[in-house]
Image (cartoon, rainbow, N blue to C red):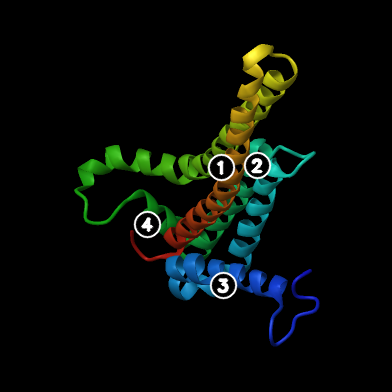
Amino acid sequence: MIAARKAKLVPGRGQNVAEMMLDFVRVNIAEETLGHNARRFLPMLTTIFFAVLAFNITGVIPFLNIASTSLIGMPIVLALWVYVMYLAVGIKKFGVGGYLKNNLFPPGMPKVLYVLVTPIEALQVFVFRPATLALRLTANMIAGHLILVLCFGATHFFLFSAGGALKAMSALSLTAGVAFTLFEILVAALQAYIFTLLSAVYLNMAVEEEH
């Protein structure tokens, strides 16, 4: 909204960055994964990408210093949104029976193997997809947060509590903290991309004829 409220034919710096990010989601995630269904799910995927990116970035903002997505509640909400959507669109297109048949009974397989395969597919569709979507994001953001806490906590200790030559170690831990902060920005963007890409993959699996 900030970038678009004064949109111009020749974009300024802020508008240009916003358009590049929107095009990235549209082309590199939605269109490449969903094909002709991309436009249908583009608003949802764009919202997820920018929301996850914003929540992740709070982990490196001074005085906030913790990513909202490193607390399990937010990833669960986002994963449930994707979960409800891919069930809803799949059932709407194929009906309950058709959706379950497409997902739980892979075609071209000897029927006797369905005794083993169908329970695994059921766990994957109804449990593993939403659970791993939430847990992957949370775990990555918690790990980054802990590394930053350790680096800057060590800097504080070496600088104010340690004695003698150990004070010099504060320069090393501070350097490591700054480096990991920059790396955490990369991780924040990467995790937003992965979460959105997997969401698009799950939506595509729900509406395609066979997998």
The amino acid beneath tag 4 is: Asn
Separation of residues labelled 4 and 3 (CA atoms): 32 Å
Separation of residues labelled 2 and 1 (CA atoms): 7 Å
Q: Which mark is first along the chain, 1 or 2? A: 2
Between 103 and 173, the one nearer to me in the picture:
173
Separation of residues labelled 2 and 4 (CA atoms): 33 Å
Between 169 and 3, the one nearer to me in the picture:
169
Residue drawn where x is 63% and y is 39% of the image: 178
Residue drawn where x is 72% and y is 23% of the image: 156
Residue drawn where x is 60% and y is 46% of the image: 182
**Residue indicated by mark 1:** 137
Q: Which mark is first along the chain, 4 or 2? A: 2
**Residue indicated by mark 2:** 69
Q: Badge 1: how crowded within 10 Å, few (<14), some, or many (20+)?
A: many
The amino acid beneath tag 3 is: Asp
Q: Residue most toward the top? A: 163
Q: Is residue 44 left or right of residue 199?
A: right
